[in-house]
Amino acid sequence: MSLDQLPDDHYRPTYEDIHISIGQSARKIKDEFDPDLMVAIGGGGFYPARVLRTFLKKPSALDPNKLRNIPIQAIGLSLYEEVSGTSEGQIGNEVVRTQWLDAKTVSGHKGAAKLEEGKDAGGLLGKNVLIVDEVDDSRTTLQYAYSELLKDVKHAIANLSDDERAALPPTRFAIFVVHNKEKTGGKRGTLPILAADLPKGADKIVDGVSEGVRYYTTQDTGDVWISYPWEEEDIVEHNRLAALAKKLQVNQAK
Amino acid sequence: MSLDQLPDDHYRPTYEDIHISIGQSARKIKDEFDPDLMVAIGGGGFYPARVLRTFLKKPSALDPNKLRNIPIQAIGLSLYEEVSGTSEGQIGNEVVRTQWLDAKTVSGHKGAAKLEEGKDAGGLLGKNVLIVDEVDDSRTTLQYAYSELLKDVKHAIANLSDDERAALPPTRFAIFVVHNKEKTGGKRGTLPILAADLPKGADKIVDGVSEGVRYYTTQDTGDVWISYPWEEEDIVEHNRLAALAKKLQVNQAK
């Protein structure tokens, strides 16, 4: 193949493209949702969560002149990541947990005193929780992650004393994915996504938990094959092909 | 400041520099250790673990013609990451767990049948476990992670039946960090690092566990300030300064 030809129709964002896009989304997320912690879905959510954290710092409870990183909790879900080269068509619907949060982590609001020392163990109760993944394809994994975390949170709230429950701020979830693929025929999974223009705090809270979820992505894409830089063995070639596609104005997100 | 001046003496690797270096280390790690799973120390270990996974695929048990991603388990340890702008001198020795592996995950060899279906839950027993972090600075976090995981593994092995224990392959640990900072006066933490030229399988196994740990890094650096790309709000400026430092042949790793 000649050097001015593309080998396929993959969309190839570079690290820099994605870093910049995440930074732009982060400003919106900070304004509208201001997350207290992230739950990264591994392995795809690890890189976006790490970059997001750079943009989502909060003033330290110990020293308000300093900025504090927000905690990242990780969960592991397998859907079509196990076997490299598996196409989506070959994939079952089943989501397999490879890692999850323990009950103590979910109900971690009791570590509130520890937060003051900069040592919050990252519990979910009473927090704004941002679930982070790489791509929203079929939405199956995201539906699973959101609904299972919600179930855990409701269970933990039910186990609180009346006093604790009364003192607890609302628990809210939002989702961030680098790319949201628009699927002809719709997504297999569903999420109770709040209207994008809903003002901050205007969501309905029932039994201490928001009824909906804010949804953020750097970009809605067509149903294209996305080659992420962290999946590439040859990053130099990846960047060369990305630049060539931009120059030729082909193989972009839409 | 003029455009041909550097604002400080930080070492600024780019995403591409680090991706390429991780790929090179991965080939060595694959040859000598061939990890079955990774334990990423969050948040710093998330990006390196995700990139390493691209280079450390294994043939699928289901279909040996396909390559399978190895699982990544995440742990959260806080030392000097809580407060942005904290210098190392201000840091206590204390390592705080913000996330850990549950006992079921540690003793996950019992999911061996599930591995055959490509659904290994990522247990540690009988595996080659690669602990991944961003930088080895004082070595305090790495010592903690290694010694605590080792303790959990020994405990889980002690709880096996005699038959299970007899059937279990050795459990081995290795460590990968993007950079290892050489410290004048030595590191605060210690690790039982195996000789770099020790042949594969020549380590001493006691009660089912290797006595030492293989240690990998893309680079030993001086005691320099490393600015990682994922920590930067302005990645374009980061790359410009990285290119300028290379051109001026200053602020490199050593």
Image (spheres, coloured by chain):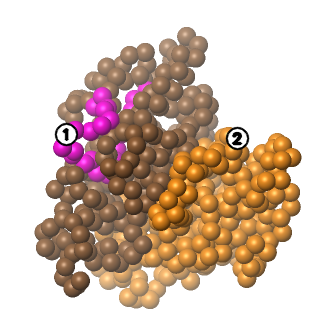
Chain colours: A orange, B brown
Residue A112: x and y in percent read: 65, 49
Residue situated in front as seen by the camera: A58 or B75: A58
Mark identifier at residue A103: 2
- The question of residue B154 being in magenta is answered with no
Residue situated in front as seen by the camera: A172 or B170: A172
Residue B90: x and y in percent read: 36, 50
The residue at 36%/81% (across/down) is: A243
Residue A33: x and y in percent read: 66, 70
Q: Nearer the viewer, mark 2 or mark 1?
A: 1
Distance of label 2 from label 1 (alpha carbons): 42 Å
The residue at 32%/63% (across/down) is: B227
- The question of residue B184 being in magenta is answered with yes
The residue at 81%/44% (across/down) is: A160
Q: Chain of mark 2?
A: A
The answer to whether marks 2 and 1 mark residues whose Cβ atoms lie closer than 8 Å is no
The residue labelled by disc 1 is B185
Highlighted magenta segment, given as a residue range: B171-193
Residue A174: x and y in percent read: 68, 66
Circle 1 residues within 10 Å: few <14, some 14–19, many ≥20: few
Circle 2 residues within 10 Å: few <14, some 14–19, many ≥20: few
Could you tell me if residue B118 is visible in this image? no
User: For the residue marked with disc 2, what is the amino acid?
Assistant: Ala
Could you tell me if residue A54 is visible in this image? yes
Task: Identify the image quadrant of the C terminus of chain A.
Answer: bottom right
User: For the residue marked with disc 1, what is the amino acid?
Assistant: Gly
